[in-house]
Amino acid sequence: LSTNEQTRKEKTEAVETLHAEIDQLEASIAKLTEDIAELTKAVAELDAAMAEATKLRQEEKARNTQTIADSQEAQTAVAQALTVLKEFYAKAGDATALLQQQPESPEIFDAPYKGMQSENGGVVG
């Protein structure tokens, strides 16, 4: 009888230990399931953010490519304009249509001006 009681106590303790272990593992499973759900949500958010960033980068790349093409066209246009201006000013240097020339001074006087020396009595009189 005492052996049965002893065996029953040991088996009861083993069952209680196993139930406690089962409860602990079930709690662990619940916690890990919750963590998996949170991490899955975070991964989905990161994927969405990465897709948005990729879309923005592609738009910026297209805009940058257009800007580069525009600047190359502008650079070509500026080079052509410089060539035209250089040719124009090279020809303008030879042309004297707008050049101001000094007119010849008219000869008004036959002799140099001597003043009124004979009539001059000096400063005092």
Image: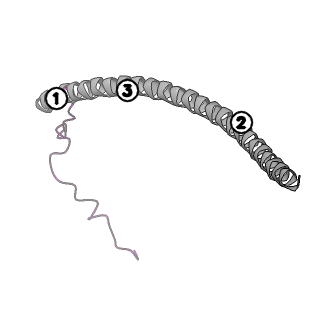
Q: CA distance from mark 1 to mark 2?
A: 85 Å
Q: The residue tagged with tag 2: helix, strand or loop?
A: helix
Percent of width and height locating residue 57: 45, 29
CB atoms at circles 1 and 2 under 8 Å apart?
Answer: no
- In magenta segment, residue 102: yes
Which residue bears the numbered disc 1?
Answer: 92
Classify 10 Å Cα crowding around label 1: few (below 14), some (14-19), many (20 and above). Answer: few
Whether residue 79 sits left or right of residue 32 in the image: it is left
Amino acid type, mark 3: Thr
- In magenta segment, residue 31: no
- Name the residue located 47 percent from the left edge and 28 percent from the top edge: 54
Q: CA distance from mark 3 to mark 2?
A: 49 Å
Q: The residue tagged with tag 3: helix, strand or loop?
A: helix
- Name the residue located 15 percent from the left edge and 45 percent from the top edge: 110
**Circle on res. 34:** 2
Nearer to us in this view, 56 or 37: 37
